[in-house]
Image: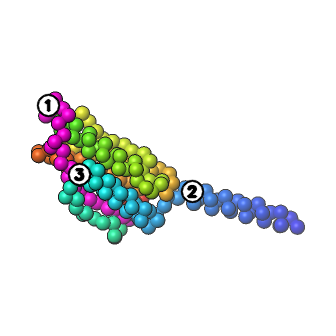
Amino acid sequence: MRSLRVLPAVVTAGAVLALVTACSTPPGPEDQRSDLLSVAEHVETDLVDLYGLADLRVVDEGAEPVPCPAGGERYRRLTIGTMDLADYTEADDTTDLVDGRLDFAGGAVGGAVATNPVAGYFDQSRSIFTDEPEPRQAVYFSEEGPGRGAWLTADLVPMEDGAVLVRLETSTACG
C-alpha cells in the first residue's frame, strides 16, 4: 500500500523534471528553420516593397546547415541588397547626410523586423550605431520562446553614390 502512495510522488517529480528540462532546452535548428525563413522573407519583402531595397541577392537560402563557431550546426539565410537613398537630403552637411541615410536604413530594418508575422522571434535588439558615417550593425534576437537562440543581423554600409548596402543574416540557434 505504501508503494501506491510513493508512485504518484515519483510520477509528479518525473513530470516536473521533464517540464523543466523541456523549458530550459532551446529549440533546435530544425525546429526553428521554417519559422526563421518566413521571418527572413517577410523582412526582405518589406524592405523591397516599402523602402526600395534593390538588387536583392540570396547568398545562402538556408537549405543546408552550416557549422557554428562554438560547435554544432545552424541554418541561416543570407541576403545582400542596396537601398538607393541618394534623394535623402535631410541634412546640413555630407557627414550628417550619410549619418541620416544610415539612420533611415536602420529604421527601415527595425520596422520590418517589428512587424514580422511569426510570434516569439526577435523581441530584443542591440545596435552598434554611432554618430559617425561608418558601417552600422543591428542585431535582433530572442532569449525566450520558440525563437530562443535565433538572431537576425543587419549590417548597413554607406556607399559613395548615396546608397546603403544592406546585408541581412538570419540564423537559427546552434544545435
Say few, some or many: other residues with alpha carbon within 10 Å of mark 1 (under 14 / 14 to 19 / 20 or more).
few
Give whichever of discs 1 and 2 has the lower sequence position: 2
Alpha carbons under labels 1 and 2: distance apart: 52 Å
Q: How many marks?
A: 3
Residue extending farthest right: 1
**Where does label 2 land, which residue?**
23
**Where does label 3 land, which residue?**
52
The amino acid type found where label 3 is placed reads: Gly
Would you say residue 100 is visible in this rendering?
A: yes
The answer to whether residue 23 is above or below residue 109 is below
State if disc 1 and disc 3 touch (CB < 8 Å).
no
Q: Which mark is residue 93?
A: 1
Is residue 95 one of those drawn in magenta? yes
Q: Is mark 3 on a helix, strand or loop?
A: loop
Which residue is pictured at 57% across the width and 60% down the height?
Answer: 22
Would you say residue 133 is visible in this rendering?
A: no
Q: Give, as a single range, the part of the protein colored magenta.
A: 68-96
Alpha carbons under labels 3 and 1: distance apart: 24 Å
Alpha carbons under labels 2 and 3: distance apart: 41 Å
The answer to whether residue 162 is above or below residue 95 is below
